[in-house]
Structure formats: structure tokens, C-alpha cells
Image (tube, grey):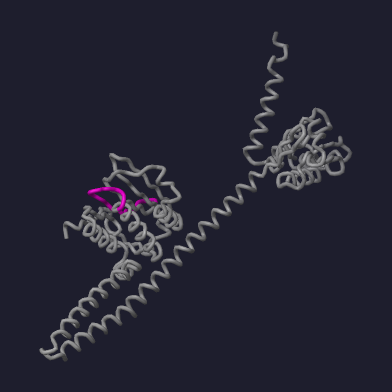
Amino acid sequence: MNNQKPPYGELETKMKEAEELIHALRTQQVDAIVGERHVMLVRLKQAEESLKSSRNQLRALATYLLSVRESERTVIARELHDEFGQALTSLQLGLSWISRKLTPEQRPLQEKIRSLSATTTSLIRSVKNIASELRPGVLDELGLVKTLKSEAREFQGHTGVQCRFKTNTAKAKFDHSAAVAIFRIVQAGLTNVARHARASRALITLMKKKNGLILTVMDNGKGITRKLVYSRDSLGITGMRERALALGGTFTLGGSRSKGTMLTVRIPLSRIIVGTAFSSPRATLSSPDSR
Amino acid sequence: MKARKRERRRSAKPGGESYVFRLFVAGNESNSSQARGNLARLCEEHIKGRYKIDTVDVLKDAAAAHKNNVLVTPTLILIRPLPKVTVLGNLNDTRQVLAALRLNGDEG
């Protein structure tokens, strides 16, 4: 009995051959499958490489476009503030000079001047707001953390949604373009909260952890569907994802009706922190209510 | 002593047994080109002057592949010495290919 050939010998050989074939296919070492009449070329490796290359090119283009947009915004904001803002201020000064020169008998003219002056003041405020939205001056002057605090406060003021900001990075110095990207992600996240979430509370956190910087924007609203997260029409979400990827980070967005929506961005510290001065690990909490 | 033994083995068998290979490739596709190059290099390094490679391009002769039960390219068949051995893939893994072709102890 012991000298008998194993009954499944042939089957074992076939199995081994099949395993080798699967291995060759899996490791992309096959470039043609031979049939009885036809030969089918397999170009998985090339297709994958070409797809990877296209994806990298697209990502580079997206990053470039984002940087171009930021520079253009900066230029427009500066022009608006310096040129247009200055001209409007001169106009207002001129109007007030004329107003002082008018006699009490010229009342209709005085009324007109007052009205024009009010319009000019309103225009100056609008120009400031537009310039600030295009390029938040506070980001350049005060840094990311204070800008986010201010953003949370303004968001609460505009929408009535209670918004808090929590961080342990108060003294960190951020790379400028990274700071702009993080700020824009928060802006877009809050815009989504205001537009879609139907939330009563929102929380922004920016925390330094061992393996990177973690930014979250969460709310207690109606949540978001998976379909919407990956929809081609969700341009705001695509923009946030591209900004996070451009910093070598990851972007996740999810939520449910009971838990609201949570946006998380993880970025390697090496890509964003310029200075190493960090506040104590305990987070500082900033709420517009407490101000 | 050990070194001398190894040296003796390396320079041995100038007129050892000869090898016949049949390599099935698909034109100049990436893996096929690599397999061609790898096989030629291995033969030159290990059995110089004692091998014959018969290359079959399945894009020109699919029937030959079918006749030899070749399902994919690149496929290398060691025809002689027997027993026949079939190796799939681009032959990049030198150590495994030499072992499969029973060439790991045979230096030319």
C-alpha cells in the first residue's frame, strides 16, 4: 500500500501550475494570454503606471492651480485694499471737506453730501470685507491659530451656530502655504456647516499629535451621505481633499444623522511646522461666548 | 580548503551536458523582453557554450504555444535535460529561476 503512487498526484501538479500562474498574474509578470485562436495582450503594469502618472500629473496641476488662485487672491486683495480703498478714503475726505465749506443755506447740497458720504463709508466697509475674504490679513499678521479663533467667532456671529475652537498649537509657527491651506479647509468646512448641516453647534480642533497635525471640523447637524462625499459635484469637498493631499496629508469626511458631520485632515508635521515652539500639550479652548 | 573546492566546482564541466530551452514571448512586450534578457544572461553566466534557446513569438505563431500547452507569456520550457521544467514570468528572480532549472550548482 505504501509503495502506491498518490491518487491525487496529477491534481497536485495541476494545482501547483495554477498557483504559479496566479502568482505570475498577480505580480504582473504576464504580458499575453494565449488562447486556441487568439492571443490577448495584458498590459496591466503599463496601464497601472500610466494611471499613476496621470493621477500624479492631475494632483500636481491641482496643487499648482490652488497656489495660483491664492497668489491671484493676494494680488486682488492688495489692489482692492491699497488702490480702491485709498481712493474711496480720499473721496470721503473730499466730501467732508466740501461739507465743511457749505453754508447753512445750502441745505439740499449738504443732504446730498451726507448721503454720498454714507454710501462711501459703506463702500469702504464692503471693500475691506471683500479684501479680507480674498486674503485674510489676520492670517499674515497674527498667524493661523488666531485667524481660526477669529473665523470661529465670525462664523457664530453670522450664522448663529455656536462655534468653538480648540488647539494645542498656540505657539507653533506654520509654513505660510500650509497655514493658508488649513485656513481654506476650515473656511470651506464651515461654509458646508452653514449651508447644509442644519446644526446648532460646531467645533474646530487643531491638535498636534505624535504622528502629525490633526484638524477636525465637526457639527451636530444632519450628517452627510457617502454618495455626497464622493460626488463629482461636491466641489468644496474636492477642493478640501486636494489641499490636504497637496500637503502630503489625508482627508476624511463622514457622518450620520445622529452624530452630525466630521471632517478630519491629517498632515505630517514636517510639511507644516516651521518653528518648534509649542504650547503645553493641554489644549486651550477658545469660544466666542467667553470673549 | 572550502574556497578551493568552490573554485574547482565553478571551473568544472567545460563539456558538461547541454541545455535546450524554448521561450515563449509576446513580441517586445515588457515582461517578454525582460525574460529574453534574463535568460540570455543566466545562460552566459552559468552554462556558457552549452545552451540553445529557441524563442517563439506567440503573436506570430500562436499555434506553437497552444501545442505546447502554453497559456501565458513569457513562459520558459526547459526541454533538455529531462525532466521538462516550465517557468512562468519575466525570470527576474535569478535565485528561483536557477533552482527551478536545476542550474544552481552548475557553473560554466
Residue B43, can we see it? yes
Name the residue located 15 percent from the left edge and 89 percent from the top edge: A100
What residue occupies the far right of the structure in this picture? B15
What residue occupies the far left of the structure in this picture? A104
Quadrant location of residue B72? top right
Residue B46, can we see it? no
Name the residue located 25 percent from the left edge and 48 percent from the top edge: A199
Whether residue A9 is situated above or below residue A46 in the rendered picture: above
Quadrant location of residue A223? top left
Name the residue located 61 percent from the left edge and 50 percent from the top edge: A49
Q: Position of residue A161 (x, y in %)?
A: 23, 53
What residue occupies the far top of the structure in this picture? A1
Image quadrant where one finds the C terminus of chain A: bottom left
Q: Which residues are magenta?
A: A195-211
Whether residue B28 is situated above or below residue A269 in the rendered picture: above
Q: Position of residue A283 (x, y in %)?
A: 25, 53
Q: Does the segment drawn in magenta span residue A203?
A: yes
Image quadrant where one finds the N terminus of chain A: top right
Q: Position of residue A245 (x, y in %)?
A: 45, 54
Q: Position of residue A182 (x, y in %)?
A: 36, 59
